[in-house]
Amino acid sequence: MKNCSLIIKGKYVLTMDDKMSVFNDGVVAVDDDEIIAIGEKEILEKYKSEKIIDAGNSIIMPGLINTHTHAAMAYFRGLADDLPLPVWLEKHIWPAEAKYVNKNFVKKASALACLEMIKSGVTCFNDMYFFEQETASVASRIGMRALIGEVILDFHTPSCKTPKEALKKTEEMILKYKDSELISVAVAPHSIYTCSEENLSKSKELADKYSINLHIHISETEKENKDCLRDNEKSPVKYLDELGILNNKTIAAHSIWLDDEDIEIYKNRQVKISHCPISNMKLASGIMNFKKMRESGLVISLGTDGAASNNTLDLFSEMRACALLHKVNNLNPEIASATEIVKAATINGAKILGMDDKIGSLEIGKKADIITVNLNKPHLTPIYNPCSHLVYAVNLADVENVIVNGKLIMQNREVLGLDEDRILEEACKFKRN
Amino acid sequence: MKNCSLIIKGKYVLTMDDKMSVFNDGVVAVDDDEIIAIGEKEILEKYKSEKIIDAGNSIIMPGLINTHTHAAMAYFRGLADDLPLPVWLEKHIWPAEAKYVNKNFVKKASALACLEMIKSGVTCFNDMYFFEQETASVASRIGMRALIGEVILDFHTPSCKTPKEALKKTEEMILKYKDSELISVAVAPHSIYTCSEENLSKSKELADKYSINLHIHISETEKENKDCLRDNEKSPVKYLDELGILNNKTIAAHSIWLDDEDIEIYKNRQVKISHCPISNMKLASGIMNFKKMRESGLVISLGTDGAASNNTLDLFSEMRACALLHKVNNLNPEIASATEIVKAATINGAKILGMDDKIGSLEIGKKADIITVNLNKPHLTPIYNPCSHLVYAVNLADVENVIVNGKLIMQNREVLGLDEDRILEEACKFKRN
């Protein structure tokens, strides 16, 4: 019998490996940060541990990966709803950001967002906002995995007077976190309508210099496309491609208003997609061409966007919305199957962030980012197929335990080492001001 | 100080009355089955009770009303997904029903469904299935409000050899429950494609005889419309109208494939609509014309449909799906506002079932069907607008207490007088067979 640091067992182990292996009455053995064995009860004959999580009637699966969010916007959750995007943004969100967003705001609001994400089974997120050093610190302290991007804009922002300053901050973070186990850094130019060609190109240079991701919003609204066609006589995707921005390290959020040629460019450049169906539905931005993009072989992952346009950071809701939307939009219930959607929230998320060698599935040698979902609930009984339940029935409160990098960070829904009451109280206090 | 049987207090009392009154730090006083006072802390100076629920940082609101479901199908939750409707129905659901559905099945599966609905804040549901006497008994025993309809079909069903027998059973239930506080009965012919003109007319006669509701599926699929046009040279709505079936006691589930004339007929006959967006999306049946129907002044409520096509009985998910779907479908975020959607799940549900004199809002003289939603959660913090949270952020697990007809049936998420473990175990046992 070999010793290991943690053993987790439960009704179903959903690996999300290439074969979509599922182990009934399954066991995962973890040593330090790594999965060292996975299978059925035979694992218990080979490994022992002082720490055993018996999750009972549960699904044990990879942690969910949120590939596009603005964590600190959690403080603006529900600030304004049911409004046209320009009104929402210009009359509500931007003024609130100008008034409230500072280092301390981002620190506190990121703690709320991380708490919410852990409690809904998210173990890794891809962020873009201001004062991202604060978000990185919070995630790192709590023990979450994150890809961090200080947003780059042409104009003065709450965190940076100039885009040059934002690029400088980004490079500082790249160097600071180059050996971090949990934190990676992306270059994050906001979009084509808020970044000049020069700033887009400088962003790409920086990403190339360190061979890291570039995270950007692309074709989120019809207006973005129309304006680009008017000003540049080409679509945003073509515009970015001709600037040399797009490659297999580009993480493109939204990507709604793409035509066939744009999809072909994405395919040729191996652009990575973060699909945000709830935000796109709520703001009525449009419906991404999921069917065509899948048929083109593109890899699609899921993002919640910020809580101001969602209004949660819950990937279970996102999975369900994604499956339901594309079925009805194509009048075809076979599109966006449960299995495909669970992939989008796990292994595809890892692929999109360039982390699929480390996370996204439960396999020997991968990092132990693992969640357990408690099935002892009326709305999850009976169960015929774990993926079906994850997409069509599970909600965030069913997540029971969360492990990141081999470390238990939530046990029986209690987030360890965090003062949940204080984080909520701080958020309420902010709102009262 | 007057004595009353129950006092509930909490952060927000959302009345859903005509003025959409909200009381901050609100109080509701209940005596026996009735709301006798509602307001702010002044209520506490006038009323006292031995039983006080201090819900703290909560929303206190009317219980949710599920206006179209097939409760006992909870045992088929996730049995088959991501399939075209004919394959799903003919290869999976119908064979499973033929094999398994009997009196005992309906009794047990209805208990699971009622448990699930209570735990997600539903206090009243409108059901259509086989052996509905069992569903009525379960709901009544648990203390839920229900409108019960034994499904009428032209052919032999698990519960009735002939439609005549189903009509007879319906009439027996009408007489049995005529003085019931909780159980009402509807006549429930399944649809135009499963009921002859004769059976539709006999159903209507029975509904008229007792002046009760008639509950039917209308225009759920494009096929239903095409077949009706082929066979009768008119739409299902026109066909039913010419048969004299439609009036203000008709509860029409789905109503997706309606043209302008059909909507006009609904309006003239004051037909009541149960909109089931999740089921319609999941089966890719189509998108109901929410915008046009609302503009025509039609009252729209929400139904989950059965758990086999949803896969839960959760009206919070239904509210969110409804708001999101119609915004993106119309490329207009102002459609289906949070307030309008909460109405659909509460007061409109009561209107649709002809119960708005009794339930659907918190008002003096109405029956006390009340739920509390706990806001002390990361995904519900901070809060700017209660309706926004209910639609875009709350999930079923946030429901804390449930009161029906003045009686507390769930306290701190424990359903009183029900053996939850046994109900779940029975469901698992069924699935193993």
Image (cartoon, coloured by chain):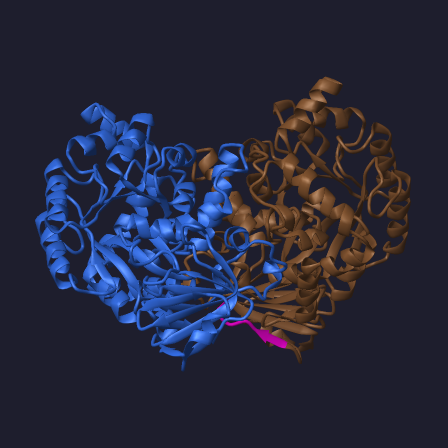
Chain colours: A blue, B brown
Measured as percent of width and height from the top left, residue B83 is found at 58, 39
Measured as percent of width and height from the top left, residue B411 is found at 62, 72
Horizontal side of A96 relative to B419 (left or right) equals left
Is residue B391 visible in the rendered image? The answer is: yes
B242 is within the stretch colored magenta: no
Q: B285 or A280: nearer the eye?
A: B285
Q: Which residues are magenta?
A: B52-59
Is residue B303 visible in the rendered image? The answer is: no
Q: B68 or B183: nearer the eye?
A: B68
B53 is within the stretch colored magenta: yes
Residue at 20% across, 33% down:
A241
Q: Is residue A375 above or below residue A50?
A: above
Measured as percent of width and height from the top left, residue B24 is found at 49, 64
Horizontal side of A155 relative to A35 (left or right) equals left
Residue at 42% across, 79% down:
A48
Q: Is residue B97 above or below residue A134?
A: above
Q: Which quadrant of the structure image shows residue B432? A: bottom right
Q: Is residue A129 above or below residue A189?
A: below
Horizontal side of B62 relative to B139 (left or right) equals left
Q: B114 or B383: nearer the eye?
A: B114
Q: Which quadrant of the structure image shows residue A191? A: top left
Residue at 31% across, 53% down:
A356
**Image quarter (top left, top right, bottom left or bottom right) of the N terminus of chain B:** bottom right
Measured as percent of width and height from the top left, residue A285 is found at 38, 37
**Image quarter (top left, top right, bottom left or bottom right) of the C terminus of chain B:** bottom right
